[in-house]
Image: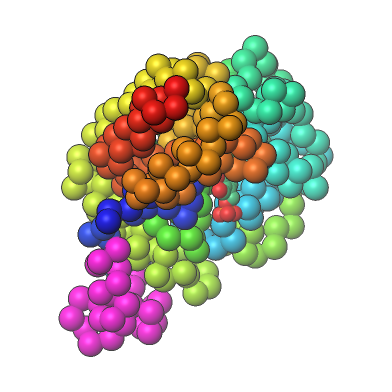
């Protein structure tokens, strides 16, 4: 039976990418050796790293001042790395508190300097993107999380920070839509949603604004150190980088982020259409803040949970249990998830109404 994988991350990747990645573990491109047993300094792997970096620049149409790194430590370390590289000694930064990961970013930045939390939706269990805030003009940057994986909310437009540079965690919606990188100083994203397997984190770095915080930065956390070494300061996570490169090649073949954005919009329209139509379901996120990547919803009558859980499991649906801090269900619809999988879920929701409503 076909499995419909709605997992929040790690998550579904294109089938052809997994086949190519599996093959490369056996033997890379006919060289008689596995991807994971060759030197990261070999010409084969250096070419892979360069292609993986270039694809990011091409797909996101990045201005020349940006460089691309594939590092380790996940997005969790990137929350701290961002502050180390951009929050000046004695300075302050503005943060938007839109969910668990945004709150973690605030916690990490507070280790280093003053943090001004200018907007939060914590009081309503992060069910919307806060509005009506102002960025102090002495802030070094505004940090925000473009997509809140757990709560299913998303910035539909990048925030206007009135000239203050932007720093963003794009872990769960990078490569899902085009955006203008011009106002950014830094973007980071864990690979394990729209890019590849867990094990690497992507950094998109404005190379002109590093080295200005007055801090003594530990070598691995210093983005300038990694830039000088072309993302090879130490042994990179070769499998995660290679598989990310394959996914980005796949994305390019699909027509790039503009094409995938349309498909993501169709998937989101299908699931939210059913949540709004079907009286047995209600959404967690407010309509104006709904994520195209993670749809969070619950039953209006909890006594139907057992029936619904059996029905979606019987239909081959996997990974839609909500995060414990929200409850209910979460359908994650990353780039590689086909529309047909969403249609299967929508049909199960409609069937629940027909049989139990
Ligand atoms: C938006 C966001 N930021 C950060 C993280 C943490 O990522 P990692 O597990 O790579 O540290 C996650 C994980 O799901 C996430 O969704």
Q: Is residue 36 magenta?
A: yes
Residue 279 vertical position relative to residue 31 in the rendered view, above or below: above
**Quadrant in the picture for the N terminus:** bottom left
In the image: residue 214, left or right of residue 20 = right
Q: In which quarter of the image is residue 33?
A: bottom left
At a point 53% along the width and 41% down the height, the residue shown is 306
To which quarter of the image does residue 162 belong? top right
Vertical placement of residue 165 versus 53, above or below: above
**Which residue shows up at 36% across the image and 35% down it?**
348
Residue range in magenta is 18-46
303 w.r.t. 229: above or below:
above
Task: Tell me: 141 left or right of 340.
Answer: right
Outermost residue on the top side: it is: 132
The C terminus sits in image quarter: top left
Image location of residue 344, percent across then percent down: 30, 38
Residue 288 drawn at (x, y percent): 50, 16
Q: In this orientation, which residue lies closer to the viewer: 352 or 219?
A: 352
Q: How many numbered discs sit on the rendered protein?
A: 0
x then y, percent, for residue 154: 51, 28
Relative to 170, say whether 211 is above or below.
below
């Amino acid at each position: 039976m076909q499995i419909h994988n709605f997992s929040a991350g790690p998550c579904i990747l294109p089938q052809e990418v997994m086949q190519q990645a599996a093959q490369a573990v056996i033997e890379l491109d006919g060289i008689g050796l596995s991807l994971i047993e060759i030197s990261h300094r070999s010409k084969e792997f250096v070419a892979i790293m360069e292609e993986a970096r270039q694809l990011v620049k091409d797909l996101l149409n990045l201005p020349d001042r940006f460089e691309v790194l594939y590092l380790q430590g996940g997005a969790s370390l990137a929350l701290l790395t961002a502050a180390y590289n951009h929050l000046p000694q004695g300075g302050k930064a503005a943060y938007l508190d839109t969910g668990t990961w945004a709150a973690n970013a605030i916690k990490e930045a507070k280790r280093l300097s003053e943090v001004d939390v200018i907007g939060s939706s914590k009081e309503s269990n992060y069910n919307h993107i806060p509005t009506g805030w102002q960025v102090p003009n002495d802030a070094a940057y505004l940090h925000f999380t473009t997509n809140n994986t757990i709560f299913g909310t998303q910035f539909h437009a990048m925030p206007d920070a009135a000239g203050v540079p932007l720093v963003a965690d794009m872990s769960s919606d990078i490569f899902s839509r085009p955006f203008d990188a011009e106002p950014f100083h830094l973007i980071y994203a864990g690979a394990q949603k729209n890019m590849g397997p867990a094990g690497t984190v992507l950094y998109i770095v404005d190379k002109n604004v590093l080295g200005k915080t007055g801090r003594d930065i530990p070598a691995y956390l210093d983005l300038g150190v990694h830039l000088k070494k072309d993302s090879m300061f130490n042994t990179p996570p070769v499998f995660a980088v290679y598989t990310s490169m394959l996914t980005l090649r796949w994305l390019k073949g699909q027509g790039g982020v503009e094409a995938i954005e349309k498909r993501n919009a169709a998937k989101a329209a299908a699931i939210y259409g059913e949540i709004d139509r079907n009286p047995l379901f209600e959404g967690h996120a407010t309509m104006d803040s709904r994520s195209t990547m993670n749809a969070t919803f619950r039953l209006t009558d909890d006594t139907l949970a057992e029936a619904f859980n059996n029905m979606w499991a019987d239909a081959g649906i996997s990974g839609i249990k909500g995060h414990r801090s929200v409850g209910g269900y979460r359908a994650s619809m990353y780039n590689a998830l086909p529309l047909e999988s969403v249609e299967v879920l929508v049909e199960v929701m409609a069937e629940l109404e027909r049989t139990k409503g």
